[in-house]
Amino acid sequence: MDERAIDFFVTEGGADKIYPYEFDEMGYLTTRQNLGDILVNESILEKIQNISTNSNSELALETVDLFSAYKNDNIFFSLNEIYECRISLKKHVGSVGINNDMIRKFPRCKLDFGLQILFNIFFYHCYWPGEWRVCTIFPLRKGGERDFSLSENYRGISNTNTVGKFLEILTFKRMSVLILESLTEFQGGGLPSRGSVQTIIHLVERAGSFRAETDFVEGGKTEHSNFVAVALLDCSKAFDKMDRRIILDKLYKMGIRGRLFRFLVSYFHDRQQCVKIGDHTSDKVTTRNGGPQGSVIVLFTWLVYINDIINVVKNCDISLFVDDVALLIHDHNEQQLISRLNEDLSAIYGWAIFNRVLFDALKFNLLDIGVNRICRAQRDRVIYGDFHPSWSKSAKYLGVIIDQKFTFIEFINCVVLKVHNSQWRIFNHSNIRTGVSPYALFLILKTWIIPLFDYGCPIWIFRVFDGVFDMETSPVRGYGTPFKKLSTLYIKLCKAILGVPISSSSLAVYVRLGVLPLRYHLCLRALVWYLRGFHGKAGIVVQKQLFRMYADDEVWMNTCFYQPCYLMLRRLSAFSGVNFWEIPLHKVSSVIRDAMFSELNHFWSRDSTATDTHLIQPIWRYFKFSRICHSRTSSVLFHKCALGRAPFRQFLHRCGKHDSPMCRGGCKSEETISHVFFECNFFNDQRQELKKLCKEKNLEFNLTNLFTKEPLQLKVEKIILKFFDESI
């Protein structure tokens, strides 16, 4: 048997006990006690029921100190735990059996007590049901252009029993209370208040400060920029190859003991999986390592598994995001830089061997991002094991493309391509006759396309304009073309939502939709991330970095995210009179947005185009669409009227599409929106209907209310459609 297949000893109540697990010759997890069919006697049920109903026990519904309660690893699951976990279940999570949404909607008294009895029986016996340890894997194609005849171009998605996932979440919460604070602060994934955006911000700002640093060389007479390098390491099949013996060892050492530990042993015991493609399912096989992807327990145990890698890295700044590892190093001497980098790579190689983790050197990305370039001879010295990783001009890290010049232009072009490939989601449903309502299209935009614009924008939006900007600020050299492409896509989508011609005023479309221009929208996302970091809601590492850089004037001046956000907030604060640093985080986005609209209103008031839109919407602010519309055609006409693009005779005559600008009702006046709604005799009956409706809704009869108030929209649409019926 492997030397690491050892028995774990623990003292409980003064007596030494051997933990009930070991590994056979093949490395499979086995047990000494029978974990098969469990006979639950009445005494156990009575014991659990008594604990559940005892108001003085730890399982009562009153709020208790979780750490103090769970420090006893043998405590049973309480009704409150069951309830809180059940209502927090996510919809549409891949699972087998009853749907999460159905579990969430059960009345509390009908389900929670039954689940409590069931889960506590399993917990009492440290037994994880066999069916819940079987996962069905569905192959999902990876992104990009790939050869899908090869299995490595598919990602295995694991589905397990829904109730089993419920129990996993309960167990995970127990684990996290006990050892969450023991995890390194440099881990950016799989933990509360941490994510990929925060990790990227921290890495980019740290690298930017290294690039800006200079050292004096040649006896202190010459100022020389530092050499800076980034190493992005790829961990191959992290969740699948995680050694169960090692993870159980680490969990025990970090404080998971007693019944909870034995329960986790049962979770990893005799796990099986099969693959399903269409109607065909493979035979079940027993797995030796790892666990199913999508399991919160497996994700959390991986964070524990890789947690101590930071202890071997002595020279580089390290960033972790689940199984992605980034090393950042700088030095005024390129030879010393490579030597120090090799020391850390050698240490990581040793850690990987001992922990049975495979870092695929073929997929490493090394970037020379300093102002001064490392010579080729020194770059060739980098070694991992017996392999020399290659250097790249750019590499993707957490979905963001980092280039060696640190401009992120390649990433912006990548965003342009992604948005371009997704615009069909709007255009396929925006036909003037068969399309859906603007509300539905705007929902599609926010759900599917806006996230493509948003992701990673904090690290590059202020580089485009070289700091603080307004509507009249031009992009700096090199950013003009990619940002123009991105802005063009954004306004095209906005115009498609309203159904107005592409030649319509972009500014008027923004005002009509009640949205921010792209530059302001991306700035808003960056400012929210800044304030999250300021309040410690983006991870303690980001907060520490922000305060440390703010305290150093020279470093602060060279930040490409923190300082521009700070200056932008100060400008908006002076303009609106709001102290954004004191606003609660759940309100900060809407407050900043309103401040931006206040600033944009000054720009809108000076604009001399789109006179009809100025007449209808003199104030640029958030606009709430009606959920319903009479038809797509009437909705398009409704918004064309507000933008001065409706087929009134004056507009058609100006475009050369009609002989006369005079009113079709025989009035001796030009046919404009104001004439039709307030003067035209031909429109008198409809005008009286609208006046009556306005009186019922306690609204003044004017163009602003007619084209901006939701209660009037449906009636106005019908009347407009009838009026233009001969022109459609």
Image (tube, rainbow, N blue to C red):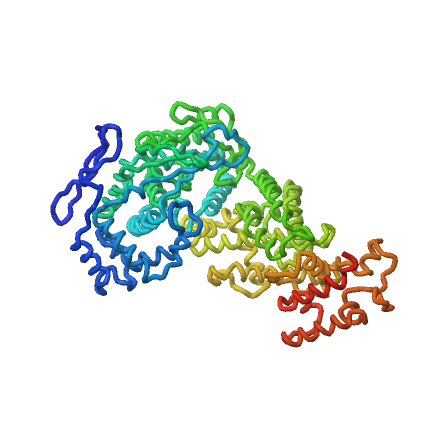
In-front residue for pair 427/436: 436
State left or right for residue 491 relative to residue 284.
Answer: right
State left or right for residue 646 relative to residue 233.
Answer: right
Q: Position of residue 287 (x, y in %)?
A: 32, 34
Figure quadrant of residue 647 = bottom right
In-front residue for pair 157/365: 157
Q: Is residue 224 among the parts visible in the rendering?
A: no
- Write the residue at 18% across / 54% down: 44
Q: Position of residue 138 (x, y in %)?
A: 43, 38
> Does residue 608 lie above or below 447 as drawn?
below
Figure quadrant of residue 289 = top left
State left or right for residue 375 relative to residue 8.
Answer: right
- Count of number-bearing discs: 0
Q: Is residue 272 among the parts visible in the rendering?
A: yes
Looking at the rendering, in which quadrant would you find the C terminus?
bottom right
Q: Position of residue 73 (x, y in %)?
A: 23, 51
Looking at the rendering, in which quadrant would you find the N terminus?
top left
Q: Position of residue 343 (x, y in %)?
A: 38, 30
> Does residue 546 lie above or below 344 as drawn?
below
Q: Which residue extends farthest left?
A: 15
- Write the residue at 65% across / 65% down: 714
Q: Which residue extends farthest front?
A: 279
